[in-house]
Image (spheres, coloured by chain):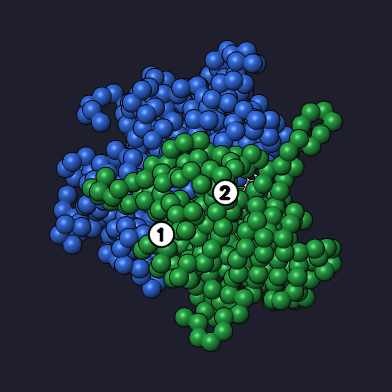
Chain colours: A blue, B green
Amino acid sequence: MPDGAAPILDVSDLKTVFTTRGGEVHAVNSVSFQLAPGELLGVVGESGSGKSVTMMSLIGLLPMPPAEIRGGQVMFEGHDILKMTPAQLRAVRGRKIGFVFQDPMTSLNPVFTVGFQVAEPLRRHMGMRKKQAWKRAAELLELVGIPDATARLSDYPHQFSGGMRQRVMIAIALACDPQVLIADEPTTALDVTIQAQILELVRELRQKLGMAIVWITHDLGVIAGIADRVMVMYGGQIVEQAPVRELFANPQHPYTRALLETLPSVTGARSKRLKTIEGQPPALGAHPTACPFRARCRHVMDVCHEQNPAITTLDAGHDVACFWDATTGEARHV
Amino acid sequence: MFDGVKKPILKVDDLKMHFPIFKGVFRRKVGEVKAVDGISFEIYEGETLGLVGESGCGKTSAGRAILRLYDISGGSIELNGQDISSLQGDELRRLRPEMQMIFQDPQASLNPRMTVASIIAEPLDEHKKLSKQQRMARVFELMDAVGLHRDFANRFPHEFSGGQRQRIGIARALALNPKFIVCDEPIAALDVSIQAQVVNLLEDLQEKFGLTYLFISHDLSMVRHLATRVAVMYLGKIVELAPRALLYSDPKHPYTEALLSAVPEPDPSSLNKRERIILEGDVPSPSNPPTGCNFSTRCPRVMDICKKEVPEFKQLDDGRHVACHLMD
Ligand SMILES: Nc1ncnc2c1ncn2[C@@H]1O[C@H](COP(=O)(O)OP(=O)(O)OP(=O)(O)O)[C@@H](O)[C@H]1O
Ligand SMILES: Nc1ncnc2c1ncn2[C@@H]1O[C@H](COP(=O)(O)OP(=O)(O)OP(=O)(O)O)[C@@H](O)[C@H]1O
Ligand SMILES: [Mg+2]
Ligand SMILES: [Mg+2]
């Protein structure tokens, strides 16, 4: 992506905390990142590392309480989204910023037909009449590969398969030609051929509309194929960030390195037992004062128990938060 | 892997699962979604049968029908030699501990008002008489097994991430030590490391207790790792059923070929190296399947006969089954 272009989305120092019966959960701890216009930012990371909560926080979709945004700024078109009134938010969300949730069953309303739910943003944001919106809804479903789209508009969500529901969510997110699309595990329920079709569609839309995309996924194959840049999260923090080729060729953080080692493949040798990353993820009970990965890290040093490593920028736009230097195999000199 | 005679734990014969389509104010029946339209296969004790195929082709419906979570529309299902196709009520309930399902949609299958501990313990409460201590010990054991922090036992499902919720469902399915488990996309929502953890766990349990799995997944590399044999479904029918190594090294059905060629490789520099088969043509609908072969509208190697006659699901010399006119 063009260097130096003003970011369309600029997140700084975002902190999100949940209050539960068992105490606080510090789900997002000082997360900062930028998204350039037209860029596709891949987000990977451990399950529970705060990927979804980060994205929900920045478009004001978390129920508060129990969630609370303890700090940070999310700049979009010169305004801080976190300071917007509910009415201002509604005008941005679903219109300028589209999103696909991780859980398609719960994000579709079971009592309305699929057609109603796809047509709704078209009527609300694009001022379409009922008939026109219904027609456009059918086109959108076709675009995401739902067979017999017109007939299936009057189905209810439970009549759709998991992957079909996911595609409905994608259709809704794309309905109003957003400038930013936030897609949280949008293709987990899709087979590889339909996934390839969706990825192709996304590629086209980026070219045509210059849409910028945040794409959360566990599938590193997908990331390798579509992302410009990748952000790796662990324990509510960004631990590494780099252009996609750089990240795969030259991973720096011990978590990223372990992650890349755990991959099975369809072509290579078949391993007897899959590699895992030993140990438990952090419980996130408080704002971290030490490295969140220390308990599972192969290269842990004394300092890792005492301080939380700050982000270091290496060359080639490659950021890492780690005291250990992968190049020298020793403590990093800063 | 198997010496001597293989014993099928499950026998499915010409299974059909059709859903009625209703329209209008009077909810008149106007048609049917033929989600599963005549599939036959066996699963042998201790093996893992992988089930892959296009989104919406009927995998979940097949899995649910086999476990008799639905009343089936046709065909028969035999579990351990017992015909369970038409069991109802108590008879069915007694079978439940034997066979379990890990659901594709974790959120929708977890009661939001129950804590994690009580969700995992629910099957224990229903089918086993355990003391309070035994019950909690078993819950912790299961939470450890799937990599959930014990501290989370009193949390509610909405307080978890997608991947954590999926693991609650897995722990619950394992609670009664079932013999046969339908795993419906059990790992799709998990990160790679936890995927590996869960897959290793499934393998360990299989080894220890001789479990049998029907493993539904879009992740072809995981299926390759885990499955003994693989069934490929397309629009309600099985198009190819083969031992793992054979299927991956030498796919016979054009749909299997296309599917394998589309797997994204986790290597940004390998792009475009592999030849990808992009499927074109109309995606057919299960309420109005094409005449002849269901894949004929998109098959890159379609012939005249494919548009007229339904190909038979036949065994080839190498032991696999394929439904394709190219094999004639
Ligand atoms: N409503 C809530 N109350 C309490 N804790 C929560 C709540 N929602 C999320 N969390 C916690 O916040 C952390 C981050 O969750 P998040 O959903 O962002 O993870 P994720 O990275 O998206 O994981 P996954 O890959 O599994 O979807 C998790 O530890 C989760 O348990
Ligand atoms: N309760 C239902 N009522 C009507 N149609 C249904 C119902 N359940 C499933 N279907 C339809 O049956 C077909 C097969 O759905 P199924 O959920 O079995 O697919 P699947 O192979 O599991 O797909 P995915 O990979 O997307 O999960 C789809 O066309 C779906 O819309
Ligand atoms: Mg998530
Ligand atoms: Mg399914």
Which disc is residue B46 wearing? none
Q: CA distance from mark 2 to mark 1?
A: 22 Å
Pick the front one: B318 or A50: B318
Residue B242 in the image, given as x and y percentages of width and height: 48, 66
Which disc is residue B309 wearing? 2
Residue B184 in the image, given as x and y percentages of width and height: 58, 57
Which mark is first along the chain, 1 or 2? 1
SS of the residue at dot 1? loop
Task: Judge from the rendering whether residue B297 lies leftward or rightward of residue A248; answer left or right.
Answer: right
Residue at 39 percent of width and 27 percent of height: A205
Q: Are discs 2 and 1 less than 8 Å apart at CB?
A: no
Residue labelled 1 has its Cβ within 8 Å of some atom of ligand 2: no
Is B127 placed above or below A289 here?
A: below
Residue at 58 percent of width and 12 percent of height: A127
Residue at 62 percent of width and 21 percent of height: A134
Is A28 placed above or below B133 here?
A: above
